[in-house]
Structures are given as structure tokens and as C-alpha cells.
Image: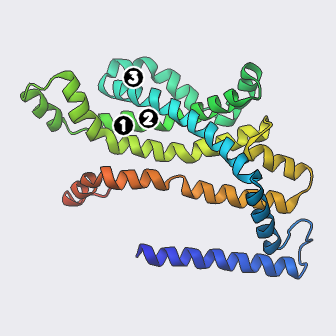
């Protein structure tokens, strides 16, 4: 079934590409505004071979990765703590609920005033945007651990550290990975938007510069690369999830419940 969907998706992409080429070649839209897809692909190859696009994309991915890494390192422990301690959650809940309602793009503006337009501002924006999905999914994963697991561990006189690493973290791992899968595309988008708003490098700055100089084929080539990258980013985490959490899928099927899909 999934293979059929894959081929249908590829066929749809090819049909859109052919329609794009035909519309551009027939000049139904100004070629200056909608260049032929063939022209864009040639420009894509040129920018890739010259290293311009890979370098710009690499800068963006590095900023995204750093912000995501910091958010993961801080929010997973905090989510576990909040999930295990109602007092901690009641203490931080007003702050969390207030901040997570803010559109992450708005944080870029004050961050520019404090941190400037360098990488620090982009990393902070990514950190802020990706923190809440990771924290909330981790906390929900901890709270949803069946009480039987914890009671059994206590009956066996399991120590606190053993309880944490042998029961709580494995049982909450699906929620943690769900939070990461939700945070990755958000982090990528915010990294690009922060470069568009205030940046001198990265794929976002490259897109803005191309748009301002009316280099439409160059801009469209960068958009295609960005779209492909966004689709590929989740694949490694999905592979890790299928390898490390195969037991979870089998358990869900055995209990006749559907797996969590973010």
C-alpha cells in the first residue's frame, strides 16, 4: 500500500513539473516571473556544483541543529521532571502556557536587539520554537506511563536511578520521539525565517537576496532544494524510531490500539 502511495506521489510531482514546463514554454505566464522548470534545474545544477547552495544550506542546517540540540538537552529532562512531579508542572505551567502561545517568529525581533543578526540569534529562535513540542510530548509520555509499570518496579525495590533509566525513559520514549519529529520541521522553518528577517548567510538569506535582485531561477532553485531537504530531515529519526521502538508498535498492535503518529 505504501509503495502505491509512493508511486502516486512521484507521478503527481512529474505531472506538476510537466505542467510547469508547458505553461512557461507557451508564455502563458511571463517567463521572467515563471521560468521554465528546465532552466531552473540547470541553475540548480550550476549552484550545486559551484558549492553556493550546499554552503548556504549547510549554514542553515548547522544553526538548526545547534538550536535543536540545546532544546533536546534541556527540555527532555525538564519534561521528565514535570511529568513525574505535579508540583513542578504547577509551578512552570503559567510560564509555559504563556510562552508557547507566542508565534516563534515574534521572538526573532527582540532576539535581534539582544543578540544581533549573527548565528546566536538564529540558534536561540530555533531553540525557542522547538522547545515546546519536545517538552510537552516528553511530559505527556511520562504521564501516560501505565501505573502498573511503576508499581511493579517499586514492588521489586527498584532504585530511583534504575526506575528512571529502565522504566520511565523507555516507556516515555515514544512521546519523546514524537516531540522531536514535531520539532524538526518547525526548527527548519524558523532557521530559514530568521535568516530572511535578519541574516547575512544561510539559505534564507540566499532566498531573500535572490528575490530582491529578481534572480528568479536562482530563487526557485533554492526553494526546490529547501523543499527536498525539509522532506528528508525526518527520515533519520523515523529510522531510529522503527529500529529502537519496534517493541512499541508490536505492543500497540497486540493491544488492538493504533500507534502514535505525529
Q: Is residue 147 left or right of residue 257?
A: left
Say which residue label 2 marks. Answer: 136
- The reply to whether discs 1 and 2 touch (Cβ–Cβ < 8 Å) is yes
In the displayed structure, would residue 155 be above or below residue 254? above
- The reply to whether discs 3 and 1 touch (Cβ–Cβ < 8 Å) is no
In the displayed structure, would residue 96 be above or below residue 209? above
In the displayed structure, would residue 44 be above or below residue 115? below
The quarter of the picture where residue 148 lies is: top left
Instruction: Tell me which label, 3 or 2, sits earlier in the chain.
Output: 3
Which quarter of the rendering shows the N terminus? bottom left
Provide the secondary structure element on which disc 3 rests.
helix
* Residue shown at 69% from the left, 58% from the top: 225
The quarter of the picture where residue 258 lies is: bottom left
Instruction: Identify which residue, 12 or 64, lies in the foreground.
Output: 64
Say which residue label 3 marks. Answer: 89
**Distance in Å between CA atoms under marks 1 and 2:** 6 Å
The quarter of the picture where residue 104 lies is: top right
* Residue shown at 62% from the left, 44% from the top: 61
* Residue shown at 42% from the left, 46% from the top: 178
* Residue shown at 57% from the left, 58% from the top: 231
Q: Is residue 255 left or right of residue 152?
A: right
What numbered label is drawn on residue 140? 1
Label 2: how many residues lie within 10 Å, few (<14), some (14-19) or many (20+)? many
Instruction: Tell me which label, 3 or 1, sits earlier in the chain.
Output: 3
Provide the secondary structure element on which disc 1 rests.
helix
Asked if residue 235 shows in the view, the reply is yes
Give residue 142's position: percent from left, percent from top: 31, 34
Instruction: Identify which residue, 132 or 203, lies in the foreground.
Output: 203
Provide the secondary structure element on which disc 2 rests.
helix
Label 1: how many residues lie within 10 Å, few (<14), some (14-19) or many (20+)? some
Give residue 209's position: percent from left, percent from top: 86, 47
Residue furthest front in the image? 50
Amino acid at each position: 500500500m505504501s509503495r502505491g502511495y509512493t508511486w502516486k506521489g512521484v507521478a503527481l510531482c512529474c505531472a506538476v513539473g510537466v505542467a510547469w514546463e508547458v505553461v512557461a514554454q507557451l508564455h502563458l505566464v511571463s517567463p521572467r516571473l515563471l521560468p521554465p522548470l528546465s532552466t531552473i534545474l540547470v541553475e540548480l545544477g550550476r549552484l550545486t556544483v559551484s558549492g553556493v547552495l550546499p554552503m548556504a544550506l549547510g549554514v542553515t542546517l548547522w544553526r538548526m541543529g545547534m538550536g535543536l540540540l540545546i532544546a533536546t538537552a534541556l527540555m527532555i529532562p525538564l519534561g521528565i521532571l514535570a511529568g513525574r512531579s505535579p508540583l513542578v508542572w504547577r509551578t512552570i505551567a503559567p510560564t509555559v502556557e504563556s510562552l508557547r502561545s507566542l508565534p516563534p517568529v515574534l521572538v526573532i525581533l527582540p532576539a535581534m536587539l539582544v543578540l544581533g543578526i549573527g548565528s546566536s540569534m538564529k540558534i536561540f529562535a530555533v531553540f525557542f520554537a522547538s522547545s515546546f513540542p519536545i517538552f510537552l510530548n516528553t511530559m505527556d509520555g511520562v504521564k501516560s506511563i501505565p501505573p502498573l509499570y511503576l508499581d511493579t518496579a517499586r514492588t521489586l525495590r527498584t532504585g530511583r536511578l534504575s526506575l528512571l533509566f529502565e522504566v520511565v525513559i523507555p516507556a516515555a520514549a515514544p512521546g519523546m520521539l514524537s516531540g522531536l519529529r514535531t520539532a524538526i520541521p518547525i526548527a527548519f522553518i524558523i532557521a530559514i525565517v530568521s535568516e530572511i528577517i535578519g541574516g547575512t548567510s544561510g539559505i534564507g538569506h540566499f532566498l531573500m537576496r535572490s528575490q530582491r535582485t529578481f534572480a528568479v531561477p536562482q530563487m526557485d532553485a533554492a526553494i526546490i532544494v529547501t523543499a527536498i531537504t525539509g522532506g528528508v530531515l525526518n527520515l533519520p529519526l523515523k529510522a531510529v524510531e522503527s529500529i529502537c521502538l519496534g517493541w512499541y508498535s508490536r505492543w500497540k498492535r497486540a493491544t488492538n490500539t493504533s500507534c502514535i503518529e505525529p
